[in-house]
Image (cartoon, coloured by chain):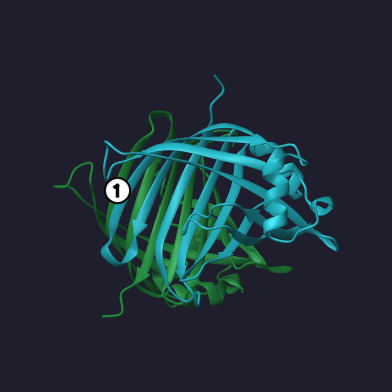
Chain colours: A cyan, B green
Amino acid sequence: MDIAQFIERSIGQWRSQRSVHHLAFRHFEEVISTIEIVALVPDSQEVLDLCQTHGVDPQLIVHPFRMSWQGESDWDEAEVVEGSTVLVPVPDTDCPNQGKLLRDQGYAETIPAIGQYRIGADGVFVLHTPYDRAMAEEKIWFASEHIRFRVSLIKTSLGSGVTTASFSSEVRSLS
Amino acid sequence: MDIAQFIERSIGQWRSQRSVHHLAFRHFEEVISTIEIVALVPDSQEVLDLCQTHGVDPQLIVHPFRMSWQGESDWDEAEVVEGSTVLVPVPDTDCPNQGKLLRDQGYAETIPAIGQYRIGADGVFVLHTPYDRAMAEEKIWFASEHIRFRVSLIKTSLGSGVTTASFSSEVRSLS
């Protein structure tokens, strides 16, 4: 599976059930949200802007997309968490199963970020994104056409410790 | 990494934080538990008994172990969930990264079970165990020497649907 196929399978609306484990405190957090993933036109302004920010040739990109989410955490039920980010894959020219993933806003910090992705022989998408004071590692895989799972780890900068681990079950909204 | 190395790294006591997602109901369950994994002597009676139950030559087994757990679910805080199971790996003779895993008690049903395991190039241990009315898929991997993660899926017998997904963060007890 290459990145274009992986994104193609991901396009749509997903109901997400997410558990966050704060390891030091053995604390649980639960989040219910809706995620929407839509394809973007490669020469749309927001995609071209992101390429320019990172100095990437727009000819090298594949299947850009926008991910939006809206959710509720059990930490503060009154607060609705929502956001949206543009993501642009840039496959390595010599190895199409891996490459860079540009995004205009990261998970761990709200600044533009560049991650390194790799899709394994088992179809698992793995993404490493370095931030100033942390590193995020994300694994996403499909259990079936309409169910995908995501494990996200926030690690210390050196990658030795894990501060937060989260698990999302994402079921496609067919309605 | 082969199965002996994987089990060697797993020996010890672990504090587990587990979230269960019941997908149809978008229900969360939280479980805090202690897991203990101890090596067993290959010619101990419990190991030989399990080999005999499954008709496996005891010469072919590698690094048998016992896993015990004691935990509390937020579904019923008064109830302490505990149990113990003997596990015996039987690597394929032609491919040491995969094989059978015998156990005297399964997760999904309390009968003896045989699973098929495989350790990928990325070090992820994947186990498939068929049961009468369901199939369990488990992935376990180490983030560091003292942190491991586990994703368990309960699938319908045909493997197309996932009824329950759970995620465990396991941190080694160093005390």
Considering every residue shown, the one lying at the far bottom of the view is B175
Mark 1 lies on a secondary structure that is strand
Three-letter residue code for mark 1? Glu
Q: Nearer the viewer, residue A60 or B76?
A: A60
The answer to whether residue A162 shows anywhere in this view is yes
Q: Mark 1 packing: few (<14 Cα in 10 Å), some, or many (20+)? A: many
Please give the name of the residue rendered at 67% of the width and 67% of the height, measured from the top-left corner: B121
Residue at 35% in and 56% down: A21
Quarter of the image where the C terminus of chain A is located: top right
Rendering coords of residue B46 (x, y %): 40, 67
- Does residue B77 lie above or below B119 as drawn? above
Q: Position of residue B111 (x, y in %)?
A: 41, 47
Is residue B132 visible in this depiction of the protein? no
- Rendered location of residue A150, percent (x, y): 52, 49
Identify the residue shown where x is 50% and y is 69%.
Answer: B142
B111, B154: nearer the viewer: B154
Tag 1 residue: B30
The residue drawn where x is 27% and y is 37% is: A77
